[in-house]
Image (cartoon, rainbow, N blue to C red):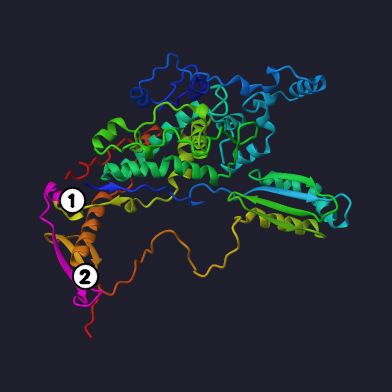
């Protein structure tokens, strides 16, 4: 039998070629009556159109959520979602929370322990005791 | 080079009249002959289609209500959403922007790429023609990249690399990574297909068939992944989600080619397909590497390969390590470490063979780069003798 081949699939490297924004949908929920939504209502009127224009990749939904605190819910490409409650926040702070959701990857937050995380082999190779300058004991 | 008039061509592909119904190979070997080049309209069971109109409605008010619904919302009669609905879909616009699709690709065509032939058998509205075009483009670009970049790859590895870059599993994963959701048959604005019944055998699944052993026969008879061709598939039975989403990715490629032209399609391919990671050296599977290397050296008129111990430790312990190098005259072809002399020699031979097969010329060009305007004159690429025959 000469050389055979194994089957596998290619792995995605987001951002190496094209970059796919991981946030695919943002839901804005507000209440017309409650005071905690005051900043949210102003944000929806003043800031949201400009935000939506700048980020056409994100589908935006605005829906009332009566007698509840206002929330922003982000839906991500990996199928997960993240919710941030924006009660009593000013529009500028709500914009910050929106940008936070936009930039998120949807994954759970993880502590990174190594300085570099890579799918490539180390360019320096693995140290071998059998090569180089062998010293006798 | 003169710019080609793509718009004239695109009408012929977007309409089913002048379209080849399927791939030539499949036609040749399935033995089914289509009189018309358009895909035939598949009839469905009428009882499934209109349950209300078959029997006389008992309640007159209910019948009026049904009629009024049908009058108000005519889209529920059709298997795919109306063409005008694409303009008002937020999901479609977001998908268009997320993939950085060219602005010349309209949302209506993007909506059409999402409609599988199992959901809408009408070839005017489903993505079948775009899939055919996109599949041919994808496999062409992938194969020319592989053949020019790694001219010495064995054929089995080329097949498996083609599968890795442009196979259905990779394309389905890409559709998922693009954030494309699946919608079952009626309505929805995303990939629309009729899901195959659970437990049913997937038509065209290659695992069931006995694989062809000889590579020469694979080139002639089999498809671009080295699998036996599936022949015409009855889409009425439904398709798997993997098949539907991989067809969507192919259709997007075809749609970009038609609306934005060849440079845009090439750019899309490089950004979304070639940028994915594949370690080709991990695809090899040798059974007798030392013998293969021996034959290779004989063919290339190298000196007979000789395995030599470079260093060792603990020969008489329970965990010895031998570092073996394979030399052809003064040149070291490969090196490997193992816990026995045999293992070290096999690893060294594998390293030597991979070093030969994975040769890649510098600054390689592909034939389709000649289609760019102002391209430099073509220099022939390296064509190798091929893998060693044992």
In the image, is residue B56 part of the stretch drawn in magenta? no
The span shown in magenta is B295-322
Nearer-N-terminus badge (1/2): 1
Residue at image position (45%, 17%) is B37
Specify the label residue B366 is tagged with: none
Which is more toward the observer, B213 or B94?
A: B213
Residue B119, image quadrant: top right
Left or right of A73, for residue A76: left
Density class for disc 2 (Cα within 10 Å; few <14, some 14-19, many ≥20) is many
Q: Residue furthest bottom?
A: A137
| 1 and 2 marks on the same chain | yes
Q: In what element is the residue under mark 1?
A: helix
Image position, residue B255 (x, y; %): 52, 31
Look at mark 1 in the image and give the residue it sits on.
B292
Quarter holding the C terminus of chain B is top left
Question: Considering only vertical position in the picture, is B294 above or below B154?
Answer: below
Asked whether the viewer can see residue B258, the reply is no
Which is more toward the observer, A17 or B231?
A: B231
Residue at image position (39%, 17%) is B33
Asked if marks 1 and 2 touch (Cβ < 8 Å), the reply is no
Image position, residue B386 (x, y; %): 22, 42
Which chain is mark 1 on? B
Look at mark 2 in the image and give the residue it sits on.
B322
Residue at image position (34%, 68%) is A126
Using the numbered discs, state the Cα–Cα distance from disc 1 to disc 2 in whole angstroms: 22 Å
Question: Considering only vertical position in the picture, is B48 above or below B295?
Answer: above
Asked whether the viewer can see residue A55, the reply is yes
Density class for disc 1 (Cα within 10 Å; few <14, some 14-19, many ≥20) is many
Image position, residue A133 (x, y; %): 24, 77
Q: Residue furthest top?
A: B35
């Amino acid at each position: 039998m000469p050389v055979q081949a194994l089957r596998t699939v290619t792995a995605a490297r987001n951002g190496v070629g094209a970059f796919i924004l991981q946030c695919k949908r943002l839901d804005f929920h507000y209440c017309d009556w409650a005071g905690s939504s005051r900043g949210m209502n102003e944000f929806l009127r003043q800031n949201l159109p400009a935000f939506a224009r700048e980020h056409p990749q994100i589908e935006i939904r605005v829906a009332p959520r009566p007698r509840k605190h206002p929330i922003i819910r982000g839906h991500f490409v990996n199928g997960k979602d993240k919710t941030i409650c924006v009660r009593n926040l000013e529009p500028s702070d709500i914009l910050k929370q929106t940008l936070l959701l936009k930039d998120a990857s949807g994954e759970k937050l993880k502590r990174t322990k190594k300085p570099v995380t890579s799918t490539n082999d180390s360019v320096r190779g693995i140290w071998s005791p059998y090569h180089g300058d062998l010293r006798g004991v | 080079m003169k710019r080609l008039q793509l718009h004239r061509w695109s009408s012929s592909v977007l309409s089913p009249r002048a379209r080849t119904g399927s791939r030539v190979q499949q036609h040749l070997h399935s033995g089914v002959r289509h009189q018309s080049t358009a895909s035939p309209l598949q009839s469905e069971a009428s009882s499934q289609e209109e349950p209300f109109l078959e029997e006389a409605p008992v309640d007159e008010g209910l019948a009026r209500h049904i009629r009024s619904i049908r009058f108000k919302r005519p889209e529920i009669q059709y298997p795919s959403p109306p063409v005008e609905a694409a303009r008002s879909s937020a999901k479609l616009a977001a998908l268009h922007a997320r993939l950085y699709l060219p602005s010349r690709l309209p949302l209506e065509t993007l909506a059409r790429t999402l409609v599988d032939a199992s959901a809408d058998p009408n070839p005017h509205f489903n993505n079948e023609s775009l899939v055919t075009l996109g599949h041919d483009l994808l496999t062409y670009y992938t194969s020319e990249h592989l053949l020019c970049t790694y001219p010495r790859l064995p054929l089995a590895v080329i097949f498996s690399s083609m599968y890795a870059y442009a196979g259905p599993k990779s394309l389905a994963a890409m559709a998922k990574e693009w954030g494309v959701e699946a919608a079952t048959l009626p309505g929805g604005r995303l990939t629309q297909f009729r899901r195959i019944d659970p437990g049913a055998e997937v038509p065209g699944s290659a695992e069931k068939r006995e694989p062809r052993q000889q590579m020469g026969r694979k080139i002639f008879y089999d498809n671009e992944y080295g699998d036996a061709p599936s022949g015409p598939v009855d889409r009425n039975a439904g398709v798997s989600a993997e098949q539907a989403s991989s067809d969507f990715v192919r259709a997007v490629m075809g749609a970009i080619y038609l609306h934005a032209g060849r440079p845009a399609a090439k750019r899309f391919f490089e950004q979304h397909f070639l940028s994915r990671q594949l370690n080709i050296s991990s695809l090899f599977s040798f059974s007798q590497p030392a013998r293969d290397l021996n034959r290779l050296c004989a063919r290339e008129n190298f000196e007979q390969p000789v395995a030599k111990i470079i260093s060792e430790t603990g020969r008489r312990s329970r965990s010895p390590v031998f570092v073996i190098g394979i030399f052809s005259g003064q040149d070291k072809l490969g090196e490997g470490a193992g816990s026995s002399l045999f293992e070290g020699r096999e690893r060294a031979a594998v390293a030597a063979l991979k070093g030969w097969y994975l040769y890649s010329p510098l600054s390689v060009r592909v034939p389709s780069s000649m289609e760019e305007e102002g391209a430099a004159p073509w220099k022939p690429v390296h064509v190798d003798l091929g893998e060693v025959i044992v």
